[in-house]
Amino acid sequence: MKLNFILTLASLSVITGLVSATSVDLKLKRETSLLIDPAGLPTLPTVNAAKAAASAANINLDDIQGDILIGMLKNMELFFFFGIANATDFKAKLKSDILPLVTSTTQLLDNSTQPITALNIAFSQTGLLALNVTDSMSDVPFAGGQAVDPNLGDPGTTNWVPEFVGTNIHGVILLASDTLDNINSQLASLKSALGDSVTEIYSLQGAARPDNEKGHEHFGFLDGISNPAVVGFRTPLPGQAVVPTGEILVGETGDRITGRPSWAKDGSFLVFRQLKQLVPEFNKFLTDNPIQQPGLTPQNGSDLLGARMMGRWKSGAPVFLAPLADEPELGRDTSRNNDFNYADPTTGLVNTTDQTKCPFSAHIRKTRPRADLGLPENSTSNHHIIRAGIPYGPEVSTEEASSNTTATERGLAFVAYQSSIGNGFQFLQKLWADKTNFVHGNVGFDPIIGANKGASRVVNGLDPTDPTRSITLVTDFVVSRGGEYFFSPSLSAIANTLSV
Ligand code: HEM
């Protein structure tokens, strides 16, 4: 059964015409994008601009799965985690039924070439072995799997979704669209095509938040502003890190790891983490601990504390450029909202003791220290990922807000792409977010994602009126519910290696 021809009533509204129509092959065309485009996030390059950049860097965007370079712009996305029950059957279906649906980077860039529901697929180490692909991927975290990675600050797997514990998950299928109906139709036809060749292990449905919160994560902050500009894909906006293609795509210029099998070229390691966010509890903490400074109301003081924990205001405006109050216009302006590097613009030097404009421990400063490191962003000692996650779970209810207690789980379905998990996500989590001694001394944990195996976390520098003040966070506002490490192969690797 072909999968890409299932039409639902909801999807009809976005279909403008049929490019080709035979009794078995209907190619459906979109008018509206399946991606979101909130103000403040970098817009995607046009197909022509991306093709020109790709051709100059000698990479083939038609062969690279669409999610890798695009970033956090999905409207709705389902993560379908599966096990391979019958490898021979699965390989056959991977070639005949899944591969034709795998959405490339080029296809995602233009509404007219986007499918009704985009599909990407990635495999865990045990998944590759199930397919009898035994090459070493030269990536230690990937080889071991996330559940045995001791480097992430999780208190073991006690808080984990049980299905993530163990090695049963062989792969994940990502389905993205603008309606749940589209995703559900695609999933239903996919399941029917795959039959008994796979077992369904776990699913997580993500969705952009509604209305004015579109593009904002559940704590309320605009997310996805500062993904790096990958050489061969886009030209950088002011302040955007420019990173070598090989920092994200295996086997390309700048990939620091050698010895990968040739079929892995133009794939990328996909880190998945289900990160639960305790939003009412986070808000209560801010309300109880406002920054007290002349001229600030308690509400202003609470907002300032939240912004300093993140390094940006909810609008996306960086606290380094707007240290006292949110500037929504700055947040919306992609020519300015990423244009800072923590150094004094006139001297070019970072003040290593002054945290009044931005704490050294702020989430965005810990995960991308910019000039703090004293290294160019494209240096081989720097560390970058492409973030491509999406919020999951409902909006906070009135009852949850008034009781300051989470009743229904919500959070971030965190996805990161990189050519090395050890140099990418794992490095950021372990050696930057969780490490208290960081660039300019004892700065404490990243107050958003820093993890101390469930124990309380000391954070320094949050109070601009008293840089010596330490704040102890007894609650983890972000709780890891676990995940897995995957490899997202090129389309040609699926065709020529994984499905044969
Ligand atoms: C629920 C968990 C998380 C939340 C709520 C969150 C939220 C945010 C927000 C609001 C931003 C600012 C917007 C932007 O610059 O794009 C950001 C940036 C960033 N986050 Fe997170 N994040 C989470 C988890 C993580 C994790 C697990 C990592 C990696 C270990 C990470 C790495 C980054 C990076 C690299 C940036 C960009 C920093 C920059 O370039 O200035 N985040 N995050």
Image (cartoon, helix red, strand yellow):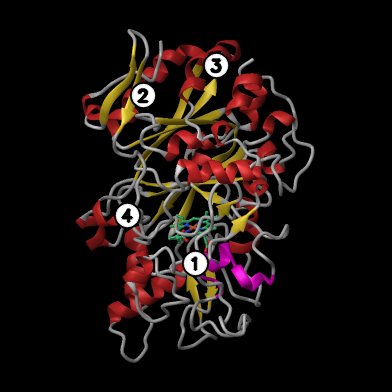
Instruction: Give x and y (percent) for residue 401.
Output: 25, 60
Instruction: Give x and y (percent) for residue 111.
Output: 36, 37
Amino acid type at image mark 1: Pro
Q: Are marks 1 and 2 in contact (CB under 8 Å)?
A: no
Rounded to the nearest whole Å, what is the CA distance between mark 3 and mark 2? 17 Å
Q: Which residue is mark 2?
A: 186
Left or right placement of residue 369 versus residue 138 in this view = left
Q: Earlier in the sequence, mark 3 or mark 2?
A: 3
Magenta stretch, residue numbers: 360-374
Q: Which residue is mark 3?
A: 95
Q: Earlier in the sequence, mark 4 or mark 2?
A: 2
Q: Which residue is found at the position 34% from the left and 38% from the top? A: 34
Q: Which residue is mark 1?
A: 447
Q: Earlier in the sequence, mark 1 or mark 2?
A: 2
Q: Earlier in the sequence, mark 4 or mark 3?
A: 3
Labels 1, 2: front one: 2
Left or right placement of residue 423 versus residue 38 in this view = right
Q: Which residue is mark 4?
A: 406
